Amino acid sequence: SSCSELVYGTTLRLPCDMIDVSDIPPCDIEFITDLRHRMQQLNPVATSAHCTDRYYIHPSLKSSSHIFLRVNRVQPPLRQPYTGLHKVLCRTDKTITVDINGRKTTVSLDRVKPAHLLPETVLSPPPVIKNLKTTDVHTSKNDEPPTYVTRSGRRVHFPKKLTTYIT
């Protein structure tokens, strides 16, 4: 006795036991040639392209003189996602050649954002800040108490009643 006889009380019928082999007619040559001919006439359906990525390219990229470049790496928090201001040297349909730290670098258009600048910003060099000289020990006016400058550059004003004790 088998496991199925013990569980179900009878033998199980397999799908091959349900079909009588003598009922199936032998394959006809005409049927096979007709089937082959019909299969050759079938035209496959055109597949759809699911993986074509389209990027938005800003229209002003064609004429902008400077750009910002996106950084394509994982960065720590509170880091700027774009570097720049980079000068555009050359353009093609898919790439832009820019000047990054004195080197020509070709980058893809999907990493680029145009920089909208005022005309005088592009032409003028950045302003130079001159260091102001601080007064030495103190500057005094007749009306005001003397001003003392510390080593760190802070100006300290003491009350008039304490000026006799400080000097």
Image (cartoon, rainbow, N blue to C red):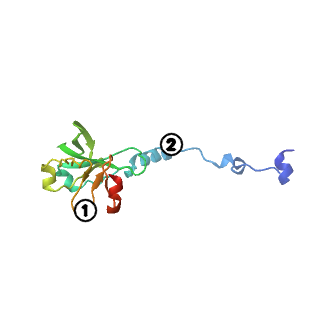
Q: Is residue 101 visible?
A: yes
Residue ID at (24%, 55%): 58
Mark 2 to mark 1: distance in Å? 121 Å
Q: Position of residue 28 (x, y in %)?
A: 53, 44
**Residue 92 in view (yes/no):** no
Question: Where residue 17 appears, x then y in whole percent?
Answer: 72, 48
Q: Residue at x 32, y 57 (%)?
A: 163
Q: Report x, y in % for residue 62.
A: 18, 51
- 117 left or right, relative to 17: left
Relative to the observer, which residue lies in front, 17 or 51? Answer: 51
In depth, the one of 31 and 77 nearer the eye is: 77
Location of mark 1 (residue)? 144
Could you say which quadrant of the image residue 160 lies in?
Answer: bottom left
Residue sitting at x 84%, y 49%: 5
Q: Which mark is residue 10?
A: none
Residue 138 picture location, percent across and down: 26, 52
Number of the front mark, 2 or 1: 1
Q: Amino acid at mark 2?
A: Ile
SS category of the residue bearing label 2: helix
Between 49 and 129, the one nearer to me in the picture: 129
Residue 27, by quadrant, is top right
Residue furthest front in the image = 164
The residue furthest top is 103
Left or right side of 157 for 129: left
Asked if marks 2 and 1 touch (Cβ < 8 Å), the reply is: no
Q: At numbered mark 1, what does the secondary structure look like: helix, strand or loop?
A: loop
State the residue lying farthest toward the bottom.
143
Residue count near mark 1 (Cα–Cα under 10 Å), binned few <14, some 14–19, many ≥20: few
Looking at the rendered structure, which numbered label has been put on residue 29? 2
Q: Label 1 sits on what residue type?
A: Glu
**In this picture, residue 36 sits left or right of residue 119:** right
Give the crowd class for mark 2: few <14, some 14-19, many >=20 residues within 10 Å: few
